[in-house]
Amino acid sequence: MEETLELARSRHADHPQLPLALRLIENTGVRTRHIVQPIEETLRHPGFEDRNKVYEYEAKARVPAVVQRALDEAELLSTDIDVIVYVSCTGFMMPSLTAWLINSMDFDSTTRQIPMAQLGCAAGGAAINRAHDFCRAYPDANVLIVACEFCSLCYQPTDLGVGSLLCNGLFGDGIAAAVVRGRGGEGMELERNGSYLIPKTEEWIMYDVRATGFHFLLDKRVPGTMEPLAPALKELAARHGWDASDLDFYIIHAGGPRILDDLSKFLQVDPHAFRFSRATLTEYGNIASAVVLDALRRLFDEGAVQHRARGLLAGFGPGITAEMSLGRWHRPGEGTA
């Protein structure tokens, strides 16, 4: 945080709204972030072509170890995976990284590929939902989810709006992977999923794609989106016979502190329920689609959730879109799930 603020002061000393930008960055709650390049390289802009080469190189260098850890935790081999869902909005490859993973990590050549590139921060929730859908259609299937987000590669030194300066202090880089098993395993047993789009909000979160790459545009109304999205979460839970205000755990995309504060207010949930998401935001910043997977990892690590506990997972992103899941925690050997 201190380094971020100092960089903002030194690089934008004459910015008329610098005090506001500094205050907004301080209020994000982000204390540390991780980036794939040294800060000096990150602040340069060698061009979209070179940046995309960095994206591809770093993804290939870093993703396999994360994937292997997810497979080991699920007690599966790469040959046990039927589908790879790969989500990222910070670089572009065709073929997708899924093809490279299949060839490099001995996945079967029949492994299906589902790359998602345009759902932004909501893609982590969407990946889980599509994995759930696939396993409902093919109950013995196993799905690997990979989220790879190098938000620092989208830094644009010429974007000087307050929203852009805020984003420079909010987003971080991260890679996460998870396995959704059709049968067996430990974790959140998915029971229902849903999606909701707030009408006429397409321009609130978007990329302006130019020769210089992705220019992130963030409308000032975005922090207030939990007021219209909270009812969608309640409705999904109600259709499942649950009360969204009375669940045992919550895994929520932490786009910023107000998202969590408002959701606590509108769902009437103790703020402590969002501790996993808030910890991700504090330690890593907003790592886009990877947030919900990291927050889920923290729930695993805490080890306190009881068998059959009911929970909600939700990712929010461009559209404005919510991707939501409901499920119960399953511990092997503790009854039928």
Image: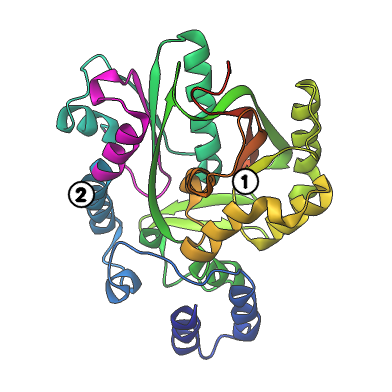
Q: Earlier in the sequence, mark 2 or mark 1?
A: 2
* In-image side of 203 versus 178 (left or right): right
Q: Residues within 10 Å of mark 1 (few under 14, many from 20)?
A: many
Q: Amino acid at mark 2?
A: Ala
Residue 269 has which mark?
none
Q: Is residue 324 above or below residue 223?
A: above
Q: Where is residue 157, by image quadrant?
A: bottom left
Q: Where is residue 262, by image quadrant?
A: bottom right
* In-image side of 157 versus 269 (left or right): left
Magenta-colored span: 65-94
Residue under the image location 54 percent in, 32 percent down: 126
Residue under the image location 66 percent in, 32 percent down: 309
* In-image side of 107 versus 192 (left or right): left
Q: Is 17 inside the magenta-drawn segment? A: no
**Where residue 179 sits: x, y (%)?**
40, 30
Residue under the image location 66 percent in, 52 percent down: 274
* In-image side of 55 versus 130 (left or right): left
Residue 61 has which mark?
2
Q: Amino acid at mark 1?
A: Ile
- Secondary element under disc 2, as helix, strand or loop, is helix
Quarter of the figure with the C terminus = top right
Q: Residues within 10 Å of mark 2 (few under 14, many from 20)?
A: few
**Where residue 298 sits: x, y (%)?**
51, 49
Which residue does the numbered mark 1 point to in the structure image?
252
Q: Is residue 138 above or below residue 330?
A: above
**Where residue 241 sits: x, y (%)?**
80, 22
Q: CA distance from mark 2 to mark 1?
A: 28 Å
Q: Is 73 inside the magenta-drawn segment? A: yes
- Secondary element under disc 1, as helix, strand or loop, is strand
**Where residue 265 sits: x, y (%)?**
82, 53
